[in-house]
């Protein structure tokens, strides 16, 4: 006679063995580490906008540096320095300086 109060798998030996193994593994596993109480740095950055402000400031700094570089080259040429002298001081080939600034300086 079949016991209708139990599901079909309740007495299955394979399922019972798998359950026993799972319980042994769970009981032998180390405790999980405590969840950090520190706020998530990504979320903090997102809501504060710190990275966005830093990127905008860096973009502005780069633009100011480009203008300063161009003005320094223009001033040096107006002071009589050659493309070669300027290139040596800046560490770039004189040809690239001439190509980039020839229309704005002379």
Image (tube, rainbow, N blue to C red):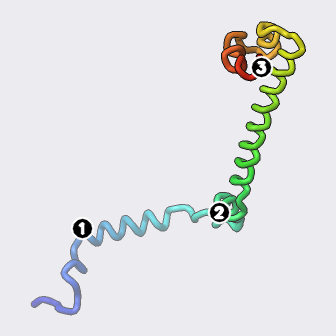
**Residue plotted at (37% across, 65% down):** 21
Residue drawn at (71%, 43%) of the image: 59
Q: Which of marks 3 and 2 is nearer the N terminus?
A: 2
Alpha-carbon distance for marks 1 and 2? 46 Å
Q: Name the residue under label 1.
A: 14
Residue 103 pos. (x, y %): 70, 20
Q: Where is residue 7 in the image (x, y as percent from the top left)?
A: 22, 84
Q: Which mark is residue 105?
A: 3
99 in relation to 3, above or below? above
Taking depth in this image into account, of 94 and 90 the one nearest to the observer is: 94
Label 3 neighbour load within 10 Å: few <14, some 14-19, many 20+: some
Contact flag, marks 3 and 2 (Cβ < 8 Å): no
Q: Is residue 42 left or right of residue 16?
A: right
Which tag, 1 or 2, sits closer to the chain's start? 1
| Quadrant containing the N terminus in the rendered view | bottom left
Residue 81 x/y as whole percent: 85, 10
Quick check: 38 above or below 92? below
Circle 2: element type:
helix
Q: Quadrant of residue 14?
A: bottom left
Horizontally, residue 9 falls left or right of residue 36, namely: left
Q: Considering the numbered disc 1 on the image, is that residue within a helix, a strand or a loop?
A: helix
């Amino acid at each position: 006679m079949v016991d209708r109060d139990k599901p079909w798998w309740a007495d299955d030996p394979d399922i019972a063995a798998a359950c026993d193994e799972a319980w042994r593994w769970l009981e032998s596993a180390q405790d999980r580490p405590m969840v950090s109480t520190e706020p998530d740095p990504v979320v903090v950055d997102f809501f504060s906008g710190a990275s966005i402000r830093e990127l905008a400031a860096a973009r502005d700094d780069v633009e100011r540096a480009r203008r300063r570089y161009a003005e320094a080259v223009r001033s040096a040429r107006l002071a009589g320095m050659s493309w070669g002298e300027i290139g040596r001081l800046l560490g770039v080939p004189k040809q690239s300086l001439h190509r980039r600034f020839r229309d704005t300086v002379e």
